Image: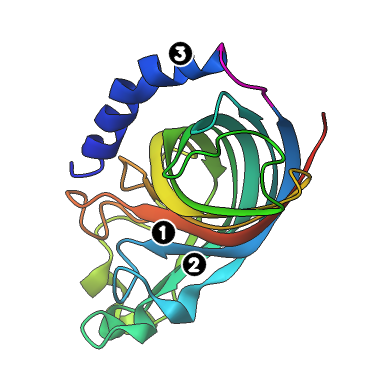
Amino acid sequence: MHYLLPLLLFCYSLPHAYAQFHQTRHPLEAGVMLGLAGYSGDMSAKRVDLQELRPAYGAFVRYQLGNRFAIKGQVYAGAISGDDKYSAIKAPRHFKFGTALVELAGLLEWQLFARDRAGARDFFITPFAFAGLGYTYADADAQYYGPPSEREKFLVVPLPEENLKSRFLLPIVGGGIRIAFYDQLILGLEGGLRPVLSDDIDGVSLNGNPGENDWYYFFGATVAMVLN
């Protein structure tokens, strides 16, 4: 539940964001993200498995509420996968999965350093943190690829498992670096964690560990332009 602390901090910050809204200009930005997606769950060797990183991409709009706060709407997509062969402990089980996923999310961003006024500097950089909610669609294809004679040893129920969810409402937390040029071009690096609050996103629940929920995450570079 450690991801709840950033969410509580952002709720505490909402009154400050509201006050800033009435004091500064409010640029509207539109941009794209290119990066990587990863997964942690029943078929991952570790929390961040570099061998299972897959391409990710997306688009977003960001509305600046003030010098420190912004709201962001985004549509991110990519693929996640896992394979027992990368884990010495899980390798004899011979499970693997892959799925495309699409995420629609709304976020509140908090920028650590405030810019006093627009256009004051040609170059401005600040770390930022974000939190919000996402709605994700993923339909995993989980498979057993081991010897047929050992199938019953590892399968509690047949694969693909039935009655697993394919749509997930989930919290999002993360952070990054924002670099602004002439108040027109915004470059960034970001990473965000998504605790799925379910064990279904990889297509394995009863055949794995139903008590341990899955995670996925996006890491990427962003480019945005100010529209107003």
Which of the two discs, 2 and 1, sits closer to the camera?
A: 2
Disc 2 designates what residue? Answer: 81
Q: CA distance from mark 3 to mark 1?
A: 53 Å
Contact? badges 3 and 2 (CB < 8 Å):
no
Secondary element at tag 1: loop
The type of residue carrying mark 3 is Ala
Residue picked out by circle 3: 19
Q: Is residue 12 visible?
A: yes
Q: In x, y percent, where is residue 227?
A: 82, 33
The first of marks 2 and 1 along the sequence is: 2
Q: Hey, what amino acid is under mark 2?
A: Ser
Q: Residue lying farthest right?
A: 227
How far, Cα to Cα, is label 2 from label 1? 16 Å
What predominant SS class does the magenta segment belong to?
Answer: loop
Q: Name the kind of residue labelled 1 in the image.
A: Leu
Give the magenta-colored segment's residue range: 22-26
